Image: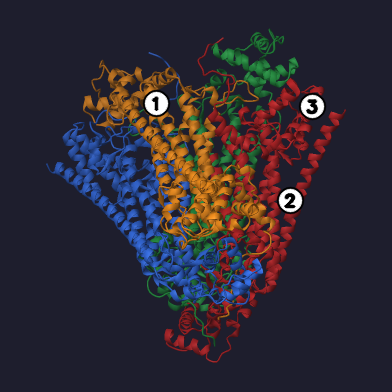
Chain colours: A orange, B red, C green, D blue
Amino acid sequence: MTIVSRPAAGPPAGPAAPELIAAGFELENADAPILHHGMNLADIAHLLDLGATGVIPPEAARRLLALLLATLDIPAEDFPYDPANGEPYNSRERYFVSQAGDVAGWLHAGRPRREAVRVAFRLRLREDLTDLIEATAGLAAEIARVSQEHAGTLMADQTYLQHAQPSTFGHYLLSFAFPVLRAGKRLDEALEWTDASPGGAGCVNGSRLLSDRAHVASLLGFRSVAEHTRDAMWQVDGLFDMVSAAAGLMVTQSKLAEDLEIWASQEFDYVTLADGYSRASVLMPQKRNPYALSIIRGAAGTLIGRLSGLLAVAKTPSARSDNLIFAYGEVPKALDLAVRATRLSTGVVRTLEVNAERMRSSLDSGFSQATDLAEYIMQTCGIDYRSAYRVVGHAVRQASAAGLRGTDIDGARLDAAATEITGHPLGLTGRDLSAALDPWQIVASRTLLGGAAPGEVERMAAGAAADAARLADEARRWRAVYTEAEEALLTAARQITEN
Amino acid sequence: MTIVSRPAAGPPAGPAAPELIAAGFELENADAPILHHGMNLADIAHLLDLGATGVIPPEAARRLLALLLATLDIPAEDFPYDPANGEPYNSRERYFVSQAGDVAGWLHAGRPRREAVRVAFRLRLREDLTDLIEATAGLAAEIARVSQEHAGTLMADQTYLQHAQPSTFGHYLLSFAFPVLRAGKRLDEALEWTDASPGGAGCVNGSRLLSDRAHVASLLGFRSVAEHTRDAMWQVDGLFDMVSAAAGLMVTQSKLAEDLEIWASQEFDYVTLADGYSRASVLMPQKRNPYALSIIRGAAGTLIGRLSGLLAVAKTPSARSDNLIFAYGEVPKALDLAVRATRLSTGVVRTLEVNAERMRSSLDSGFSQATDLAEYIMQTCGIDYRSAYRVVGHAVRQASAAGLRGTDIDGARLDAAATEITGHPLGLTGRDLSAALDPWQIVASRTLLGGAAPGEVERMAAGAAADAARLADEARRWRAVYTEAEEALLTAARQITEN
Amino acid sequence: MTIVSRPAAGPPAGPAAPELIAAGFELENADAPILHHGMNLADIAHLLDLGATGVIPPEAARRLLALLLATLDIPAEDFPYDPANGEPYNSRERYFVSQAGDVAGWLHAGRPRREAVRVAFRLRLREDLTDLIEATAGLAAEIARVSQEHAGTLMADQTYLQHAQPSTFGHYLLSFAFPVLRAGKRLDEALEWTDASPGGAGCVNGSRLLSDRAHVASLLGFRSVAEHTRDAMWQVDGLFDMVSAAAGLMVTQSKLAEDLEIWASQEFDYVTLADGYSRASVLMPQKRNPYALSIIRGAAGTLIGRLSGLLAVAKTPSARSDNLIFAYGEVPKALDLAVRATRLSTGVVRTLEVNAERMRSSLDSGFSQATDLAEYIMQTCGIDYRSAYRVVGHAVRQASAAGLRGTDIDGARLDAAATEITGHPLGLTGRDLSAALDPWQIVASRTLLGGAAPGEVERMAAGAAADAARLADEARRWRAVYTEAEEALLTAARQITEN
Amino acid sequence: MTIVSRPAAGPPAGPAAPELIAAGFELENADAPILHHGMNLADIAHLLDLGATGVIPPEAARRLLALLLATLDIPAEDFPYDPANGEPYNSRERYFVSQAGDVAGWLHAGRPRREAVRVAFRLRLREDLTDLIEATAGLAAEIARVSQEHAGTLMADQTYLQHAQPSTFGHYLLSFAFPVLRAGKRLDEALEWTDASPGGAGCVNGSRLLSDRAHVASLLGFRSVAEHTRDAMWQVDGLFDMVSAAAGLMVTQSKLAEDLEIWASQEFDYVTLADGYSRASVLMPQKRNPYALSIIRGAAGTLIGRLSGLLAVAKTPSARSDNLIFAYGEVPKALDLAVRATRLSTGVVRTLEVNAERMRSSLDSGFSQATDLAEYIMQTCGIDYRSAYRVVGHAVRQASAAGLRGTDIDGARLDAAATEITGHPLGLTGRDLSAALDPWQIVASRTLLGGAAPGEVERMAAGAAADAARLADEARRWRAVYTEAEEALLTAARQITEN
């Protein structure tokens, strides 16, 4: 028998310090409603598993299952979660003891608090992710629909808010469908990570009590088992992915929202937000504030912070509790914010009034045909693009100074510019330049893959709509799997209690 | 009369879209309790101001003040805040109309929703900041006290967790008092920014109704007026400062927490956390988890995210509502998290058990005297430091391989090493090296400004304690100012209603 | 003699692994130019200090000082920094040995690599901060100047880009001077932290060799000594402050830049960027891209990331080298980016063309007078603000639908609206409403502190200009101190070498 | 002919302002080496495409191709990139004109600067990603190999650094292989996004000059075409993914590095870093600093900042140049940092010395068997887990206070504890408890999926090694595709110039 000098071992005695309750247990209990239902299901499945493997006496299993089934009906806000008891799991333990005495102690067999909460967390996350994927698909579908409607609505595409080239509102809007759909795909992959059962991991090195980790996984409708037990207990990289995908999704929406905010100004007047997405001012009677767009943009910024916070929290040695204690609340709330904002964007797009006439008149009063004009000159006059560019640039400057518009440029003006720039005219005087000047003909010429020609936009929009539908179907299919698994789980539990 | 084509002006009609309520108004109403009391005070002060300048009929003022005073007693959770009405200010408006009819309409004279909420926000922030400053001072004071106690507790100072030089636990711990006090100073400056009244800014260009912005400022106990009205309405740079100071403060605490977590391991066993700051495991009966330290570290990571989120939200054009809508909840909650975690750190430090014996034995079994030894050789043998370093490095390697400790090195071993490295001995055999080998003598020699000599640590600790006391006094003094102002405000309002 | 089992002690043998060179030493050497000059100065001061206290033989001091003075003239890119040697300090050591043999070894007496680099880092940071403070003052001064010029340039102030109230471009622009000046103040405080000498801290517990830490501080022109030696060696909270202030400063500029980008659009046409701040398109001959504004905005986003990266790096236990290794390059580069972008903003503001006519015509075609109109009705008709607001809101909606503008609203229209809303007219028909409708009269009425009245804007602009001048003076004064100290240091060193 | 009032159109005249050069063009030119080779290839492919479609005269194509092929041999640092010309593309344009006169102007036909740079960017990113994927696979392979070696090396698994349960170093280490492999998978998906050609997108609405976007894609070896032209030009969501995956990967490595740093302390002494990954101290002769681990951890923090910076930069309206200007340098540099750090981690793991004896003795002196003991009691004595836990907890406390170890607990002590806790003994006195006390038997019992039993660890390690090999193969396969495409492209270009 060796006598060693070591720190004292064994559970701490006495009550938690008030500062610990305020900073730690209150924080965790505030998030208890997020995990409440999942903890109920996790406990039921664990008991069924313990029962099936004979670890726990049948009568204990029956009594505890009955208690847990009754607990299912207690909403989180009515359950006696109390920070003074410790974290939520402790309150549950205390409640079960208060209801069932020592029998409640069987619940902890072969499973640490940590595992129960990890299971509940994943159950919750897969619901949140399914919601977000469906919302994402909904936004993509709406974007595709409205893009199709406006495949022929002429608008100057802009960079730095400067007119670049003639395009359509449909082509513009559709460019958002693709990053939205890609975000959906990433969330789908995050769901795959989430939908793996950490059940049966024991503390961390695996369990000696259970016989098959697939059993509890299947009871809870998980599509797979998170294999390595320490990885299953402590890994957080999957959380980074889902929050990162949500942040990226919101940044994409923020871009759209900010474009629309600019375009809803009196000066642009390209679009009008529906009343239901605007807000009155309490002081200023004339205001129609595009409040929805502010919310979307703010949600994007907030999610950027949630992601960096999550990563910063995780920058610790391995197997540190803070990595998850803080994630239990932060991640579901971040996903929820993304769901709400994504649905809001969907509503904004669905009800957006597009002022096609104003877009057209703005396009007409600019010079966005200049590139096509230079290309036309290059091709018909046989001069290199840089020279053609210089000629057109000069003509544009002259026309602009004279108060003219792009469509007012004619061959004579180009020849004059060419003479000034290159020393001789290009023989353009009198030429019909409409193919290079008429925005409609310009747009119609963009039939190449991905271009702004209406037919191409319609084709792409149909493709995006189909992708969105598939994504939504997939999400709905998974949700059905989860619902069925939950029903089967409860049925199995009820059968035991009723025997 | 010019007929122009513009977007329709005037407030939007009809109800808000459900997605807008879910994403926007629910978010804002969830934060209503944070601003509730401040909005009550802001409304009362505004009414007193309107009354004093004669803008509003005396009877209307009287009735509204009575209503507002009654509202003061309604806790936020019982007030009919309802997202369906819009943001919290709209619910207040609706409630006041329900209680007082059209008279309630006078409340909005000369003041947009925005201003009322800005005022309430600053009232709240100055409370939060005062709390945080006081908590910060409390932590610094406790660190100073414990450092003083352990000015003579020998410990190897470590870099990369490798023993560097003999020092004391007191010198180590005191190094945290300084960044904590600096954070306190920064928070003090943030409080100065916060404690300026945006009142009377009108919408943004100033008010034509009021006569003196200092009046409402003084009614609310603000120490100054935020001068430029647009700056007062929209500036958020002061928020960056306070959250940045809080994040920095928490990163400092995280460093301490992580050091202690390592030192509380069985292998180090330098310190023991008090039971009240530890947590039992539900599965593992031997565990005493330093839960408090995880919470502190996680709070640091979370605040890093809150700061980057706040900055990312603010990265918009100017005068955008999202900058503040999201800050109303995020900033007070971030400060509150810092307050709780800082108090927790204070408790951990206050109750920490320091295992001086184990620190000493660990120090003794290492080689942290090597630098002093090399300096001794340089000084007494007249060789340059790099050569002395190489001699000592060689001696250490040899001693280490032989299972010896730093204190076991003697002149003969150094001479042997010198011979091997430089070709000749240094005449150290038989020399008394205790001044360079005895950790206690080494520490005692660090009497230079800021060094580890016990007297110097005690002197610095006393200074830090005095700084902490001043900081706490300052915070308490400001809190008293706020309390008195609030009492005076309510007294003034009551006097009017009672006349 | 105790035989203990411990890890082997003593410096590692053999060359660094190639992956370590690639990931660590290359990184550090890439930043060597940033610290090069400061390391030269730090070495010279350390030698003077060692010489003055007699720690080092006079001849060694002389030879080494001569070598260091010669090194001063070697540009960083020509100095043999080589990652294969280790980090830059190792290359310096090796170079000095190659030039002076063992004598070079005296340089390391009483000072770890860490201290030398810490000193160099602060020398560099104080230069960077001085530059940034001066740039900040320059921006504030330019904003104040242009604001003064446009104190009478009418413009609709906007929220969510919706016209809010009549104001002026001067009042708008001046609102940026205040956060810029506040950032300057914060940088000033960060400079105070930086300008404290970590010299003489020994490794971490203080030095036994030196006699006065103030000596080396004064040699290097530091205004104070960083007292606690461990704090001086390892603290990074001051770095958070400076990067946070720089990030906040850039977010403020990003707001201005994004406003200007919108206003430089064809549709707004409020402002025109000078040619020197615009960029041509290579493809599109008509484009004038406001490139400068993109750079400013991008710098803001980049600095947000630098700040969160800095904080995340610092989230470690205490006394960890990564906290500073990564900061050596990141922080100066972040400050440099802020300097460049701030100077760019200054140029943009200085050369901005303001299209006053277009601002006015846009203001005229809106309804931003509505608030003043409602206040007028409240005051002259004795009805509460909410009722007045409803009347005006209705009138605005009607006028807008009829294609009228705010100035087209007359008493008759208001009475009609009042009748519809409240059931009876307000007797406004025929009344002269110009005080409430004429934007100029509205703006002129905002004479209250901080308001948009030209006189008030001019007064505030003068104040901001004075503050900016003081800030610039302060920065220049500190720079002069640093320059003089450096000259005195070199003179002292030269005197010794020349004796 | 309509006379309109609009901002002046046409390219800006005159030189760029010096502040614009300093803040914008210098920034972009500093990153020119990153894109140099890709721009060469993009130009060659564009010319081949223009030639094939007959847009450009054959002789012009021939001359320009010859020039571009010659340019291929000019290293970026020798190419006349000069910020005074504008961004790098402008310097290229100027250089080509200087070499070929007006003929150079054909290069810009049908392709904006933006497209050329976007193509070059993706060419660069796919190289960087391939490197990172291969490095990731290398790390996973090394982890798997070392884990297999230590499948039988007993160690106490720890949470909060408190001994939790007996496990092995192999099981511990292998838990890192899984997140590393998942990061590899995410990078693979990011590579798929990257490896799509934006070529032929025209400015943004598609090109009218070209006939098939697949042609240029295939010339450059892209696996697909980025379909929607505006999406192809402006999308940045794929960048978020790759930087997020890299940041997650580094956070995982940081966890491992920080664990090892703790374990390399004298007090733990579980592992020893190889000399090549350590660093000597210049002052302290005894130090062996685990420098590599600091670099890995610092890289993780830095990447967290790079990710939040990237997202914050992208939070703008759509089609804003800053989104990409800043990404051109930031993203490749972030990936490169991750590559270097990942290779460093691989080296650290490969050469790590594991002190199995010390791990075992530390395990033996603790109480990590307590859970198994409680489970044993539950199973053999038929009492619930909570009661068993309380009994064992009490026994542990008693044993710990008596200076005993976990293996010293016997049936008599448990019975004594049970009597104290539950009022009666459990009949354990004299029982053989080795199955529950012997760490080796405990570990051997964890044969369930993912558990610590050596066979299970070996099985999982083999699986991880196979996954790593597949990942590496995939990366190498893609690299071969890129190399072959480049060779084919150059061959095709040379054939034209040689005709």
Are dots 1 and 2 on a single chain?
A: no
Give the residue pinned by disc 1: A145
* Label 3, residues with CA under 10 Å away: few <14, some 14-19, many ≥20: some
Q: Which quarter of the picture shows residue A398?
A: top left
Residue situated furthest bottom in the rendering: B430
* Label 2, residues with CA under 10 Å away: few <14, some 14-19, many ≥20: many
Residue at 72% x, 55% y: name it: B471
Are dots 3 and 2 on a single chain?
A: yes
**Who comes first in sequence, dot 3 or dot 2?**
3
Residue situated furthest left in the rendering: D499
Q: Is residue A235 left or right of residue D428?
A: left
The chain carrying label 1 is A
Q: Which quarter of the picture shows residue C488?
A: bottom right
- Tell me: residue A421, above or below residue A314: above
* The disc label shown at residue B51, or none: 3
- Where does the N terminus of chain D fall, quadrant-wise? top left
Question: Where does residue D23 sit, x and y in percent of width and height?
Answer: 45, 44
Q: Nearer the viewer, residue B342 or D283?
A: B342
Give the residue pinned by disc 2: B475
Q: Is residue C284 left or right of residue D403?
A: left
Q: Is residue B63 left or right of residue A480?
A: right
Question: Where does residue B15 sit, x and y in percent of width and height?
Answer: 58, 23
Q: Nearer the viewer, residue A257 or D445?
A: D445
Q: Nearer the viewer, residue D216 or B100?
A: B100
Q: Which quarter of the picture shows residue C167?
A: top right
